[in-house]
Amino acid sequence: MPLLSKRRQVSVAKEITGGTAPGSFPTAAQSGLVLIDATAAIDVENIERSVLRESLTPVKGTVGQQAATFTVTTEIAGANGGTYIDGPPLWGTMLQACGFAQSSVEALAIGIVNNGPFQHGELVTQAVSAATGIVVMDTHNGAVEVLLRDVTGTFAGTAAITGSSSGATAPASGASANEGFA
């Protein structure tokens, strides 16, 4: 006789329009989180209103803002249990719901940094290709690559890149490569 088991599943999907559920049922790729110690609490706050109208009959309080708390522990492993090539990690969507941003990260091989370092959050530009990216972490002289997010265009060849606020420069050593997500 087979043993009965109870399975619980949580799906994580982004709303395209705020307050509107996604049009299709969540896929298996959106439902692969391993949850530990999950709890949920919903707190409905009643708001008293002082409405002026023709009648002196008091108006009942109405339901106002509805706050909910969802607490969960999950394993932070690569993208859906795989590597960054499989796409962004599923738990990243949960962090986005808390106000975090998620971007793909590219590594650009560089030479010696002059007038540096490239600073975290700084926009770097390659004049020849017009490619741009935002520095993920400070990059000092001796570093062999600079990590960039929100890359536009394609970094080409060995033309120098320049930091917009620090004035740091460094020769590139080829095209950037995908490093995953941050």
Image (spheres, rainbow, N blue to C red):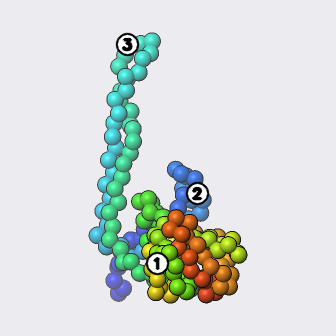
Dot 1 falls on a residue whose secondary structure is loop
Q: CA distance from mark 2 to mark 3?
A: 44 Å
Dot 2 falls on a residue whose secondary structure is loop
**Could you tell me residue 158's position as x and y percent?**
65, 85
**Could you tell me residue 94's position as x and y percent?**
43, 65
* Residue furthest left as drawn: 37
Residue at the spot 56% in from the left edge and 66% down from the top edge = 164
Residue linked to disc 1: 139
Which badge, 2 or 3, comes first in the chain's sequence?
2
Front-most of residues 148 and 13: 148
Viewer can see residue 27:
no
In terms of image quadrants, where is residue 167? bottom right
**Could you tell me residue 11's position as x and y percent?**
47, 67
Q: CA distance from mark 1 to mark 3?
A: 69 Å
Residue at the spot 37% in from the left edge and 22% down from the top edge = 50
Front-most of residues 109 and 79: 109
Residue linked to disc 3: 56
Viewer can see residue 45:
yes
User: As drawn, is 87 to the left or to the right of 51?
Assistant: right
Q: Is residue 93 above or below residue 66?
A: below
Nearer the camera: disc 2 or disc 1: 1
* Residue furthest right as drawn: 128
Nearer the camera: disc 2 or disc 3: 2
Residue linked to disc 2: 16
Front-most of residues 3 and 100: 100
In terms of image quadrants, where is residue 123? bottom right
Residue at the spot 50% in from the left edge and 87% down from the top edge = 144
Query: For the residue carrying disc 1, how many other residues have a C-alpha within 10 Å: few (<14), some (14-19), or many (20+)?
Result: some
Mark 3 belongs to which amino acid?
Answer: Leu
